[in-house]
Image: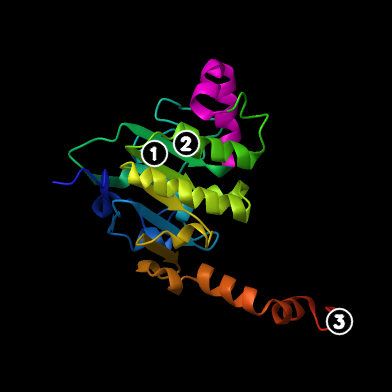
């Protein structure tokens, strides 16, 4: 019997939902949801802004016992109270073996996680993250320090838009680091807009849109198709977007 995936499946307790006409249950991806089956290595959740991907990945993280702002399960920082109630309506299937490491990396609140670490565990930042201070790094550097030093393998890692602070080159480095951790028996669930991260081989990709949720292949994603078209036709696209008066000569 395989140890992975640590998190096998998440299901919505539809019979317990009070109404599918109110937030977050009115979001099409939630409204039409029955269950999500996760890949042993990497599962992506994609969709336009407002499609519910961050709401869903937050709910998965909270269901698993993470704090709303991220970090390890031992960190329960909370500077706001605006989590949706979706996590209360989820049920999950898990492996017989628990991961030995957990981390929820959330781009929008990582600053608060770093502040917490500086205040309560500053003596271990160098040891755990490979830097003397997360606040003295750029946002991208602190993300990479987390990915390459803090995450130790045999882990269940949930990321919400990790590319937000990463240059394209750093996204490539992150893709390599994710693969190293997968080879060290880790599982990732990632909400992203990045066509670079989405290229991870054999990953499961869930597309969230106005029709609900469905699995798609990498080259079927808008992220891939639009990026490829723009790079191959960037002059025509910029003229179209900015007007014929744009001088590109």
Q: Name which of mark 1 and mark 2 comes first in the sequence.
A: 1
Which residue is disc 3 drawn over? 245
Magenta residue span? 108-130
Is 27 on the left-hand or right-hand side of 122?
Answer: left
Decide: is 13 above or below 95: below
Query: Residue at the spot x=41%, y=25% of the render?
Result: 74
The answer to the question of whether label 1 and label 2 lie on touching residues, with beta carbons closer than 8 A, is: yes
Is 107 on the left-hand or right-hand side of 188?
Answer: right
Question: In this orientation, which residue lies closer to the viewer: 74 or 86?
Answer: 74
- Tell me if residue 228 is in the magenta stretch: no
Q: Is the magenta stretch mostly helix, strand or loop?
A: helix
Question: In this orientation, which residue lies closer to the viewer: 107 or 217?
Answer: 217
Instruction: In the rendered structure, find residue 62 and report the number of the disc placed on it.
Output: 1
x and y, in percent, of residue 77 in the image: 50, 28
- Tell me if residue 119 is in the magenta stretch: yes
Q: Total of numbered circles in the picture?
A: 3
- Work out how far the residue at label 2 is from the one at label 3, CA to CA, in angstroms: 47 Å
- Which is more foreground, mark 1 or mark 3? 3
x and y, in percent, of residue 14 in the image: 27, 54
Query: Residue at the spot x=20%, y=37% of the render?
Result: 97
- Work out how far the residue at label 1 is from the one at label 2, CA to CA, in angstroms: 7 Å
Graded by Cα atoms within 10 Å as few (under 14), some (14 to 19) or many (20 or more), the crowding at tag 2 reads: many
Graded by Cα atoms within 10 Å as few (under 14), some (14 to 19) or many (20 or more), the crowding at tag 3 reads: few
Which residue is disc 2 drawn over? 68
Q: Which residue lies furthest to the left in this view?
A: 1
The answer to the question of whether label 1 and label 3 lie on touching residues, with beta carbons closer than 8 A, is: no
């Amino acid at each position: 019997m395989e140890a992975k995936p640590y998190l096998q499946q998440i299901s919505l307790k539809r019979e317990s939902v009070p109404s599918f006409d109110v937030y977050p249950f009115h979001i099409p991806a939630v409204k039409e949801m029955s269950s999500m089956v996760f890949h042993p290595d990497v599962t992506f959740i994609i969709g336009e802004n407002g499609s519910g991907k961050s709401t869903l990945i937050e709910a998965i993280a909270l269901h698993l016992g993470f704090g709303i702002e991220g970090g390890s399960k031992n960190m329960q920082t909370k500077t706001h109270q605006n989590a949706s109630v979706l996590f209360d309506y989820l049920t999950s299937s898990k492996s017989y073996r628990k991961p030995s490491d957990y981390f929820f990396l959330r781009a929008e609140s990582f600053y608060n996680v770093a502040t917490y670490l500086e205040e309560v565990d500053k003596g271990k930042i160098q040891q755990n993250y490979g830097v003397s201070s997360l606040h003295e790094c750029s946002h991208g550097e602190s993300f990479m320090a987390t990915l390459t030093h803090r995450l130790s393998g045999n882990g269940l890692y949930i990321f919400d838009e990790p590319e937000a602070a990463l240059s394209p080159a750093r996204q490539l480095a992150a893709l390599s680091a994710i693969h190293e951790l997968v080879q060290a028996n880790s599982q990732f669930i990632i909400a992203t807009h990045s066509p670079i991260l989405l290229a991870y081989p054999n990953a499961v990709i869930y597309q969230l849109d106005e029709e609900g949720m469905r699995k798609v292949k990498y080259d079927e994603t808008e992220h891939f198709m639009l990026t490829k078209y723009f790079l191959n036709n960037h002059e025509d696209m910029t003229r179209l977007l900015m007007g014929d008066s744009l001088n590109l000569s």
